[in-house]
Image (tube, rainbow, N blue to C red):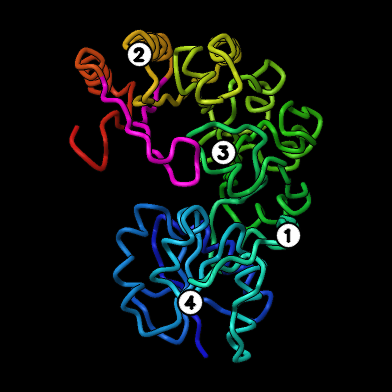
Amino acid sequence: MIAVWRYIPASRNSYAALYAACEQYGFILEPVDAPEGDIVCYSLNSVEFSRCRDEIASADQITIAGGPHASAEWEEVAEVADYVIVGEGERTLSRLLSALFSGNSGAGIPGVATRAGLTPIDHSVRLDGFPCFTRMKGYMEISRGCPFHCGYCQTPRLHGAKMRHRSRESIVEAASHYRDARFVTPNAFAYGSPDGRTPDVEKLERLLSSMPKNHLYFGTFPCEVRPEFVSRETAELVVRYCANTKLHFGAQSGSNAVLEKMGRGHTLADVYAALDVCRSVGLEPVVDVIFGFPFETDEDEEATLSLVKDVVRFGKVHVHYLTPLPGTPFSGVQPRGVLPAVDRALGKLALGGRVTGTWHDKFGDA
């Protein structure tokens, strides 16, 4: 039998991780642009599932689908795919491929769903148990899971509330294969923290000091930090050991009421304190905000615009419009439109290059 990976650019990091995991068990998942071979594997977010749904349904091959949308909406995906991987896939996909290559059904494998139902996953992945990548490269994942439960985010629902960290030795070895060391993690400054809620500065420094400064990027996309983790101690580690001169963190709103309702776990004061730290150590802040929460008032939206204006005096802002992701508390909500005055103000700031992103519905009318 031949198993292949349906290559989708948006899932290239998942491909790198799962290629490496499956290779350990003797399965080489070559990338393809259309179904071929005997088994076709997909990793899908909600947008990509919509695009690939008909392709999966009409494929002559055995189809396996995983990823964030498949994990959150496995019953929907199982209507078209033969098997659905629910949750983390490193061990589950390898088990399923082993069963199929042996001529057995994959039903009953923990973490696998079919139209008949789901067998719940029975494990969490130990990051050091699998390499970041082998032949197929992606960002180096240094931590997984998140103890915070922001209402718009799938991470704790997919990977759990307990953070798991790759060992320093494993990260250093993986980084030796790159010219530039860039990472992926829910919160870079939480690396090594037992609870993921407070930074372990000693472990952070041990990691960062183990790598060459000229090619180390930490605290930049997709390795951002949370504002309450930004202190003089943590920020100075970036200045001392890293090549980046920017620090990327999520504020998400300029309203404490909205921050509380989304379950963000920090306050507006934490955001301004992080901005002050960045300015004091010479790092340019890059700050995320989100518009469109259905419980926002006009005053809340104007408060977020006020925060944006404060940030762009010496930093940049990346704006998002709320996407109600499946499997999150905000799934199915109707996002609120942006006020015309706020829309115009953001547009003017974008023309000057200080604001990037989108504040309109990407899937509907602006």
Work out whether residue 357 or residue 183 is closer to the camera in this orientation and state it. Answer: 357
The residue that mark 4 highlights is 30
Name the disc covering residue 123, or none: 1
Which mark is first along the chain, 1 or 3?
A: 1
Residue at mark 3 to residue at mark 4: CA–CA distance: 28 Å
Q: Mark 4: which secondary structure?
A: strand
Q: Mark 3: which secondary structure?
A: loop
* The C terminus lies in quadrant: top left
User: In the image, is residue 296 part of the stretch drawn in magenta?
Assistant: no
Which mark is first along the chain, 4 or 1?
A: 4
The residue that mark 2 highlights is 297
Residue 360 location (% of width, % of height): 26, 31
- In magenta, the rendered stretch is 316-338
Q: Mark 1: which secondary structure?
A: loop
Horizontal relation, residue 126 to residue 227: left or right: right
Marks 3 and 2 close (CB-CB < 8 Å): no
Residue 77 location (% of width, % of height): 43, 64
3 vs 1, front mark = 1
- Mark 3 Cα within 10 Å, few/some/many (few <14, many 20+)? many
